[in-house]
Image (cartoon, rainbow, N blue to C red):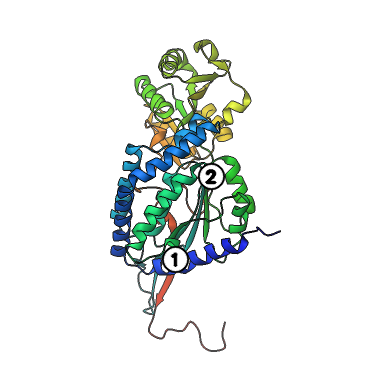
Amino acid sequence: MSHPQADLLRRAAEDALAVSRRLAVLDGAAREALLTSIAGALESQAAGILAANAEDVTAAREAGLSDALVDRLRLDPARLTGIVRAVREVAALPDPLGGVEWRAPRADGLEIGRLRVPLGVVAMIYESRPNVTVDAAVLCLKSGNAALLRGGSEARRSNAALAAAIAQGLAAHGLPAACAALVPVPDRAAIAELLRHDDCIALAIPRGGEGLIRHVAEVSRVPVIRHYKGVCHLFVDRDADLDQALALLIDGKCARPSACNALETLLVDAPVAGDFLPRAHAALTARGVRLRADARSLPLLPRAEPATEADWDAEYLDLVLAVKVVDGLDAALAHIARHGSLHTEAIATRNAARAQRFLREVDASAVMVNASTRFNDGSELGLGAEIGISTTKLHAYGPMGLESLTTCKWVVRGAGHVRAAPGSC
């Protein structure tokens, strides 16, 4: 049974496809100027954007959304300033399109290369974070793609205000709002209807809860890049600098617990557990962190609760941390292989051989040695804003910046070259 507004969703996909062809032929300077205009529009409309967001936050609290989800939803002047700054950073990035990577000419003079081109239309389906409306739009526009933006109902007012500013920036360059448009039908059933149109949409990227991502992957005819949950670990090795490890732990868990790159599980090598865990307990509980501990760590963490099996797979997105004592690197690697989510993993150690093993053997989109998991972020890794952190491996793995929103086509330049004589195959 088709969606009652199937025709409207089809038109949105077709409109996005049509304008994507216009965007694909804009030169790099024009796309940079377009993003600069969008940044200016966001600044000029800041008061309205923040007012709309305040209404969304109030409604979310009244609806009983968790503190973590409310934090993801909330904008303030500093966060909005950060969004605008990210737009300008993306605008200033090198143009990802148009360059041809030529190979050495063949012996017969035929020239072969690869030309980087846009994907076309990218459908972004996301929850809570209104900044994704801007990040997705500007990354798509900079890379010559059109964006279809389907945010969550909890951020409806915020997303509409942000989209209006983006449309103002587009209009200043004679481009329609369809270049980066909100999906006009908000209900969840519309996702399946929209993602039937694989003749118009090149890629779908869901960001949000695990349920949303699974739903998109199950109903889509369009290729999907998944941004699954971040069950991120810090392993404190027996040769770690414990002061440094404590700093990594506090930053990873407490700086912004609602982020997908926040720590959810602490693994501690048994020989240093007696020294490290009481220090970690004092530092974390002073910051309001609740601990879920396995049987070996529980005696060292007097205010912890016993962990259940479910805690090892939990993405808390809150001031909650699972803690486990393990017997060395092999046990830590085995735990991460079983319970990790391919997002971000970190080791604290001064042992170069174990650090190298951790880098080589852990399967995750980013692996850290003596650095916080919080660095797995597009801006921190030099991409400007990111459209998501892919935990799939085709065709991107980790934070997705401009290059991840492009592909390459082969180009061949000859002088009447033919492959074979007539009649051969």
> Which numbered disc flags the more N-terminal residue, 1 or 2?
1
In this view of the protein, which residue sits in the foreground, 172 or 296?
172
Disc 1 versus disc 2: nearer the observer = 2
Q: CA distance from mark 1 to mark 2?
A: 26 Å
Name the kind of residue labelled 2 in the image.
Answer: Ser
Residue under pointer 2:
153
Q: Is residue 111 above or below residue 117?
A: below
**Is residue 232 something one can see in this rendering?**
no
Q: Residue at 33% x, 38% y: name it.
A: 77
In this view of the protein, which residue sits in the foreground, 330 or 58?
58
Residue under pointer 1:
20
Name the kind of residue labelled 1 in the image.
Answer: Ser
Q: Secondary structure at mark 2?
A: helix
Q: Residue at 35% x, 23% y: name it.
A: 244
Q: Is residue 284 left or right of residue 183?
A: left
Q: Is residue 85 above or below residue 252?
A: below
Q: Residue at 53% x, 10% y: name it.
A: 299
Q: Secondary structure at mark 1?
A: helix
In this view of the protein, which residue sits in the foreground, 159 or 386?
159
